[in-house]
Each structure stands twice: as C-alpha cells, then as structure tokens.
Image: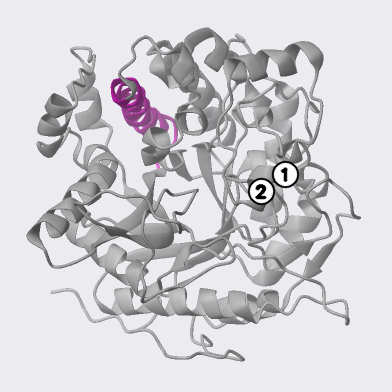
Amino acid sequence: MKAYQDNFPSDFLWGGATAANQLEGGFRQGGKGLSTADMTPFREEAVEKHIPVMDATYEEIMNFKTNGFQGNFPKHRGNDFYHRWKEDIALFSELGFRCYRMSIAWTRIYPTGFEKEPNEEGLQFYDQVFDECLKHDIMPIVTLSHYEMPIEITLKLNGWESRETIDLYLKYCEVVFNRYKNKVKRWIPFNEMNQMTTVPYVGGGVLLEKAKTNNILEVEYQAIHHQLIASALAVSLCKKIIQDACIGSMIAVIDPYPETCHPADVYEALHESQLNMFYLDVTVRGYYPSYMARYFHENNIHIKMNTEDEEILRTGTVDFISFSYYMSYISSHIKQKSEHKNSVIMVDKLNPYLEVSDWRWPIDPTGLRIVLNKLYDRFQLPILIAENGLGADDVLSKDGKIHDQYRIDYMCKHIVAIKEAIKDGVDVMGYTMWGPIDIISQGTCEMKKRYGVIYVDADNYGNGSYKRMRKDSFYWYANLIKSNGKELYANIRLKEKEG
C-alpha cells in the first residue's frame, strides 16, 4: 500500500510554462520561417467582446504572403524573449524554478518544413536558452509542437489532414532530439491534442475550406489520428536517441459537471468526458478505446489507418501525462445557447456556484482536485499540471507596482487543491503555472490579458519599454517554491481553504 503523503514531495517540479509563438517575438529573425500562428492578427472588435482569433482563411494567408503583414500582429512581437532570454531566465531562477516548460518553434528549425537541412541559427538559439536554464539549475520540459507549425505545410498539405506531415514532423523531432539529447530529458510531442476539434487551424494547421471532405468531424479526427501516430513514433524515436528520456502526452482538461441529477445529464457529462479522455486513452494505453467506435459510426467518421498503425500506437506509449486546467463547465443533454456563453471554450452555461475571471472563465480550484483524482485513477501515471493560471487586466498602481492579490488568491486555491490531491494519493510530479511572465494571449492575440507574476511594459500595439517588473505575486510564488509549498498561506487573503 502506498504511504500517506501529506505534503509536496521533495522533488516536486515547481515552474512555469510558455509557448514560443506567444513569447519569443523575433519575427523573421534568425532564419525563422512563417508559421500558422503568424497569420492571426489583433482584431479590436473581437478583443473587446473576448472573442477568440484562432483561425485564418486561405485568402487571408495568401494576402499576407503576397502583400505583407498590414496591421497589428502581436505574436510577431511576443514579449521579446528572443532578445531578452537571459534576463527572463534569471528572473525564473530568482523565483526558484526547478523546471521551465517551453516550446521550440518548428519554423526556427525548418522554416518551411520541407528543407532537407535544418536552420543552424535556430538550433543555436535554443542551445543558448537550454544552456542558460541548466546554468540556473532549471530543467527544461520541451513541447515540440505548441500551436505553431510552418504555414507552408498548411498550404501544401493542409497540415495534419495529410499523413505526409508525419514524416516532416519526425524529421524535425530527430534533429532536436539529437541536438539537445544532453540538455533536455523531458519532452511533450503536442500541446493540447484535444483542441483539434475546437480549433483545427491552431491545433493542426487544418483549413476546413481546403479539406478533402465536407464531413468536418472526419477531417478533424483524421488529422487527430495522424497526430496520434506521430506522437507514438516521436516517443519511440526519443527513447532510441535519449535512453534516459521521459516523454508525456498533454491535453486541455475542461471537466464537465452534470447540470442536474437527471440521468440524461449525467450520461451527457460522461460522454463529453470520454471524448476528452480519448487522446490520453490512446497515448497511454496504446489503442483506440471501444467507446469511440460508436461515436465514429454515428457521425459517419471513417479513419484511414495503415496496417502498421496499431503496432505503432502499442509500442509508443508515454511515461507521464500532463494537462492544462483553467476551468470546469456545466453539461446538459438539452443543448441551448446562453447569453453568458464563453467564447473561447464554448461553455454554454456558467456554474452558479463559481466566480468568473475578467474574461468570464469559471474559477474552480476544487475541480482541479477532482480532475487529478480522475486521471490518476484512470491511468496510474505521474501527472504534470502543465498549465494553470489567471488571465487578468493588471494595472500599475500609483506607487508604480502591480498589486495582484487576486492572482495570489487564484494560485493559492489551486495549489491547495493540488496538495489535497497529493494527500488523496495522486502522484503529481509538478506544477508549471501558465505565463509566468506576461505573454500574448493565444485566443485573443492581446497583451492586456496577463497571466504573469512578471509584468512586461507593453500594450496590445507594441507600445512600451518592454521592461520587466515583479508583481506582488512574484514574491508570493518565490516564497512558496522556496518552502516547497509549506508557505502556502503566507500574506494571502483566503475566504476559505479548499479541501
């Protein structure tokens, strides 16, 4: 029987997480090619209504390529990490980070994806970043594809709809595994694999207007199958090249609660949860779960599989699981739109028992504890909380500081929930808060929505000094990490302790 654990383990991985396309900037510098993320501009009217800008059309892309990028593209700037990485990693070290989850921009290594040889300047950039992390005893955890891929793969192959993309991805993987095998031991093949059916362009470089069939679900799940095969092959390749590697899968977990105890609501929540867990079921167990057969049949989805695919999935299973957690939602068998519909995650109804963020995302720390228990009961693998955080409109006070007690409250409650899950017996290996330094929002392409404990002096239009400033939450998180979670309630207002 497993011994009772009443606190964070001594080797718990405290840290933060970012994505290259939201962080780096350095647009077209260092040999970087154009990516899918480069094609999403800032849209004032969409940002005002908190509507995500997570797609592009073929016409828009070709216009940008032909006529140049007219207008405001915040992801081209990021927070200028490309030029300030040494300063930022020093701040991460001051926080006491034990790990840093980051991504490599595929387009820095293979600008179009089709080159025979990689871009040496891009490889050298990440050499510098990894070396600096290791200098500060920060373990890099690297996501290979985080909502970014060469736009040429989209234009020529329609992204992951094509099986040919697998070979292009593996070519990229092989190069970075070999290059960084002595520097990076923990890897994640894809960020939030389950978002393909929500945002196929962002999740897989898929333009539905260019798809081979009008059955959108079939297009999306075919692309998902190709990513699952690529993930399994990347796992096997990684372990061949890096014998002591540890590689995991990742999804976004937005767990449903039944709206009522009506059996139909309970089943609907179960079904929606299954569709979310499907990706982990395949990457952990190595085969398609039986519940998907009915779903594919009833939605006329026919997945093209090669004869070797079952063996590839079986032999390419992961060592750990990871997920992003920002909210829960209400599930009902009666589908109807609500005036409070969450435009990013498409939540139809808000939970009346939960508060919401400035962007109307439900705040549910207890839901994190529930998810951790569910995942560990199901998979019995170590779990990394790869993303969690609060997007807020931080404002400089008259004293020139950022007093973000609301972020401390949010983080504290969620970390308390993690501690309770550990006491429940869940093997939680680490917590990497999302955006420890302010970065561009993935969904709305804005800087105003800030997650960081480090403030960046820049606005939605690139105005500002880009100076880094420590928020109140910086000192709180640094103290928490230094105490390995024991100083959880230091200098914090809590309405109630979770658990």
Magenta segment main secondary structure: helix
* Residue tagged 1: 44
Q: Does residue 96 belong to the magenta stretch?
A: no
**Residue 111 appears in view:** no
Q: Residue at x 59, y 51 (%)?
A: 50
Image quadrant containing the N terminus: bottom left
Q: In this view of the protein, which residue sits in the foreground, 413 or 172? A: 413
Identify residue type, mark 1. Glu
Q: Residue at x 64, y 41 (%)?
A: 20
Q: Residue at x 69, y 38 (%)?
A: 127
The image quadrant that residue 370 belongs to is: bottom left
Q: In this view of the protein, which residue sits in the foreground, 393 or 319? A: 393
Is 468 situated above or below 316?
below
Q: Badge 2: how crowded within 10 Å, few (<14), some, or many (20+)?
A: some
Q: Does residue 221 belong to the magenta stretch?
A: yes
Count every numbered label the image shows and give the total. Answer: 2
* Residue tagged 2: 47
Circles 2 and 1 in contact, beta carbons < 8 Å: yes
The image position of residue 243, as x and y in percent, is 39, 38
Image quadrant containing the C terminus: bottom left
Identify residue type, mark 2. Val
What is the secondary structure assignment of the residue under circle 2? Answer: helix
Marks 2 and 1, how far apart at CA: 5 Å
Is 227 situated above or below 323?
above
What is the secondary structure assignment of the residue under circle 1? Answer: helix
Which range of residues does the magenta coloring cover?
217-244
